[in-house]
Image (cartoon, helix red, strand yellow):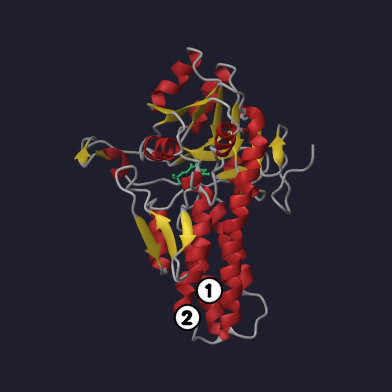
Amino acid sequence: MDVIQAVQWTPAGDAVRIIDQRQLPGAYVERDLRTVEEVCEAIRTLSVRGAPAIGICGAMGLVAALEVDADLSLEAFRACAAAAARRIAAARPTAVNLPWAMERMARTAGLPATSVHELLTRLRAEASAILAEDRAMCDAIGAHGLALVPDGARVLTHCNAGALATGGIGTALAPLYCAVARGRRVQVLADETRPLLQGARLTAWELTRAGIEVTVIADGAAASLMRAGAIDLCLVGADRIAANGDVANKIGTYAVAIAARHHGIPLYVAAPSSTIDPCAADGSAIVIEERGREELAMANGRVVVPAGALVRNPAFDLTPASLVTAIVTEAGVWRAPYRFGASSGAPPPG
Ligand code: MRU
């Protein structure tokens, strides 16, 4: 099976090519992004989404956008690069992968160089490295997470933390792809994930495309299916993990975690070290994105909330570390107490 390329260079290398995820599963449409505005708009509107994917898209999009500045003086080019990196980093607030990637790019733009051409080459190499590293981290997460997915497992996942959300085979879905590749039978239950339906539209799309059976359930059905004994484990991704292991992920993850704990079901979080924010001591330091009214008030082009009613639309929530059974990174499977390192973002051994 060919791996989905959620973010890639165009063949000419002059733009970053994404799959327009707003249109799935109805239509498979690719978009080429060439300007800072286009990159920010694609990230803001969830045309490209998922914590690692927006970091990769930001980095590659920055390079594409800077090509037009190749005639500037070195000093002016560096100033343009720094300003563009700041703008892209601010496109969405919760996933740390975005500012993490843009920080890497800004640092690269500040390196000693003799020409703009040399800097552009370095920036392109750095963006390609961010993509390649993410792909490798997904594979390693899959390999480490395999131990958590026994033959016959019935797995609940929330939102989409698969290939569409990363540069590789995903984070939460990576152990499932690896388990199936080894001949294990796996049943996946995908929360629909209101309001934008990343579970119903995207997780179900990529799993069925890979020949993996998936059952979409309403978000509200998860707890009662746990009580009925229909779920063995929960496996979700993350947008930012604090130093103490508190996890910011798609809205509804916290409810899944509470229900899982109540029913004695493990909740595993899978994420690369680029999703760990050692500067956030705990979840209270994480900004939760609030999105617009129309995402909840409209469905299928119809108004579903009366004009007089207010709407509150937090896109993410915080799951305290105490509800997380283990965190799977490319470095291994980590259990409480979580103490994520300040320098590398990687967990300490043990
Ligand atoms: O708003 P989204 O669709 O970007 O939210 C995505 C999630 O919450 C994912 O679970 C998370 O980014 C992990 S993706 C590997």
The residue under the point 25% across, 36% down is: 309
* Label disc, if present, on residue 69 of the rendered structure: 2
Name the residue tied to disc 1.
81
- Residue 123 % position (x, y): 58, 71
Q: Quadrant of the C terminus?
A: top right
Amino acid at dot 2: Asp
Up the image or down, 119 lies above or below 94; here it is: below
Please state which of residues 308 and 11 is positioned toward the viewer in this rendering: 11
Front-most of residues 42 and 311 = 42
Viewer-side residue, 106 vs 30 = 30
Residue 249 x, y percent position in the rendering: 52, 39
Furthest-top residue in this view: 228
Q: Position of residue 108 (x, y in %)?
A: 63, 70
Quarter of the view holding residue 203: top left
The quadrant in which residue 179 appears is top right
**For discs 2 and 1, the disc positioned in front in the rendered view:** 2
**Hey, what amino acid is under mark 1?**
Ala
Q: Earlier in the sequence, mark 2 or mark 1?
A: 2
Given contact means CB atoms under 8 Å apart, are the residues at marks 2 and 1 in contact?
Answer: yes
How far apart marks 2 and 1 lie (CA) works out to: 9 Å
